[in-house]
Image: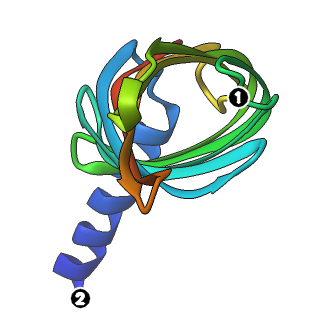
Amino acid sequence: MVLAAAALLAVVSATAGSATAAPRRVVARVHGVELIARHTQGTFSGYVTGGLSGGWLAIVNHTPLNPNARITSGTFSLAASLGQFGHPLAARIDRGSIRMTTPGAHCTNQTFMVTGHLTRLDSYSKGAFTLTLTHFRHDILGTCLSYFATVNGTLKLTP
């Protein structure tokens, strides 16, 4: 009984200490895929490595892609671990841009530079992401179709 109480006290103390610890600056690598592509919205999911490890989900609202677009809003959720403790993070995407970097002539792959700013980050004062979005395309019966998309880049969180 005493041993169980001591173990419970150790867990509570460790958890309480981690909840009050000040956040640190984080730079992480972002990897993912586009799950749903709509005319003015993309839904992405993947994982982060480096300064954090875990999974993320983002819904990005933007103006029509022609060939560039402006990010107008969105949401970003991250379920990551910092050390041995879980660290959920929910944020708003308040602005950003999508800029074509490779047009994909003759129905080859297209690439875009995607940058965005995060707000309402729980214990962080600001956040930003810089990603390369790749649209994989193929000509099928004379029509150029995007059949898959990936994102890779960097996430920065500042206390």
Badge 2: how crowded within 10 Å, few (<14), some, or many (20+)?
Answer: few
- Comparing 127 with 98, the one in front is 98
User: Depth check: 92 or 140 in front?
Assistant: 140
Q: Quadrant of residue 119?
A: top right
Give coordinates of residue 51: x percent, y percent.
25, 26
Left or right: 71 in relation to 21: right
The front one of 19 and 155 is 155
| Residue 107 picture quarter | top left
In primary-sequence order, the first of circles 1 and 2 is 2
Using a 10 Å C-alpha cutoff, classify the residue at mark 1 as few (fewer than 14 neighbours), some (14 to 19) or many (20 or more): few
Is residue 75 placed above or below 10 in the rendered structure?
above
Question: Which residue is depicted at the point 30% across and 25% down?
Answer: 28
Residue position for label 1: 65
Residue 115 in sight:
yes
Q: Is residue 66 left or right of residue 45?
A: right
Residue 96 vs 3, above or below: the answer is: above
Residue located 38% across and 46% down the image: 137
- Residue at disc 1, secondary structure: loop
Residue 56 visible from this viewpoint = no
- What label does residue 1 carry, if any? 2
Which amino acid type is marked by label 1? Leu
Q: What's the amino acid at mark 2?
A: Met
